Image (cartoon, rainbow, N blue to C red):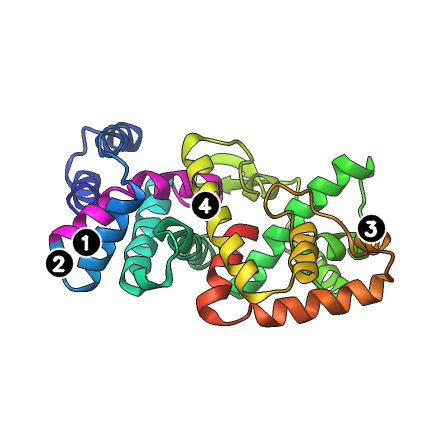
Amino acid sequence: MSTKRRMLKNNGRNSGYDESNILSIYLKEINRIPLLTEEEELDLAIRAKAGDEFARKRMIESNLRFVVNVSKKYRNQGLPLSDLINEGNIGLMTALDKFDPDKGYRFISYAVWWIRQSVLKAINEKSRAVRLPLNRTNELLQIKKAERTLMKELSTEDPTAEEIGELTGLDPALVEDLLSISRELVSLDAPVLSDGSSLSSIGDFIEDDSISPEDSLIDAALQEDIEKILESALNEREREIIELRFGLNGRFPMSLKEIGELYNLTKERIRQIEKKALDRLKAPEVSKYVEAYIA
C-alpha cells in the first residue's frame, strides 16, 4: 500500500508541507490509478484470496478513491480528513481480508460497510468527550439525518419520536432516549471545537448528501447486489415492502402507514411483514451488504 504509507511518512517527516498540501498530493496520486472493471476485480479478488500480494495491492490501490469519498462524509467530527482517510484505508484492507469473491457480489459494495465502520469507530474513540457505544453513535447519526429529512418534508421544526422511528426503523423509545442523551451532551446547534481550532456544530456531523461519480459507482454496485440478495431471500411482497420501507432501488422511503394504505393492509400487518423479511436478512454475510446500502 505504497500510496497510503507515503502519505503517512509525509505527515511525520515533512514539516514544510501542511496537511492540505500533503492531502492534495495524495489525492492526485490515487486519482491516477485506474478503476477496475468487474472482470478485473473478480480475477484480482480470487488471486488475492489465494495469497497473491500483487493482486492484493492492485485491489487496494484501485479502491483508495472510494475510501476518500466515504471519509469526506464524516468531516468536522473532531478528526482531520487525513486521519479519516487512513482509518478508512484500514477498513478497506479488513474488507479485502474478509471478502469472498465466490459469493458473487461486487467488492466495493462489501467494503463500504467496513470502511464506514472503521471511520465511525475512530471518530467515536478519538473525538467524543462523552462516548456512546459505537452502535448507538450510528443510530444517533441516523436519527439526526431522519430529523432533517422530516423537517423538510413535513415543514416542522420538531418531528416526533414516532415519525423518526417510522423513517429509521428504530423504536420510538430508543429515539427519545438518544435524543435526550445528545441534548445533555451538547446542544446540536451549539458551536464546538473541531480539530482543536475551528468551530463547527453537531449538525455538521451528518453525512454530506452531495453526489460524486464515486458515489454513483458505489450505489450502482450496491444496488445490483441488493437486488440479488432480496430476490434470493424474500418473496415478491416482502421484497417490495423492504424496498419501499428503506428507499431501495430508486424508491422513496415510506412509513408503515403509507405502505399499509398502498397494500390495503393495517400498519401493524406491514410491520409484521417487515420484521419477518428483516429476520431473513440478518445472516452476517447478508446483513453487511444491506447495512452498507441503507446506512
Residue visible at 69% across and 41% down?
148
Marked residue nearer the N-terminal end (2 or 4): 2
> In the structure shown, which secondary structural element does the residue marked by tag 4 occupy?
loop
Q: Is residue 86 left or right of residue 153?
A: left
- Tag 3: amino acid: Leu
Residue visible at 37% across and 58% down?
104
| Residue 194, horizontal then vertical, whole percent | 47, 40
The residue wearing badge 1 is: 56
Q: Gap in Å between the C-alphas at discs 3 and 2? A: 52 Å
The residue wearing badge 2 is: 52
Marked residue nearer the N-terminal end (1 or 3): 1
Is any part of residue 295 visible from this angle?
no
Image quadrant where residue 185 sits:
bottom right
Q: Gap in Å between the C-alphas at discs 1 and 3? A: 48 Å
Marked residue nearer the N-terminal end (4 or 1): 1
- Image height check: is 8 above or below 261? above
Q: Gap in Å between the C-alphas at discs 4 and 1? A: 32 Å
Residue visible at 40% across and 35% down?
214
- Tag 4: amino acid: Gly
The dot on residue 44 is: none
User: Mark 4 packing: few (<14 Cα in 10 Å), some, or many (20+)?
Assistant: many
Part of the protein shown in magenta: 54-80
Q: Is residue 244 left or right of residue 24?
A: right
The dot on residue 262 is: 3
- Tag 1: amino acid: Arg
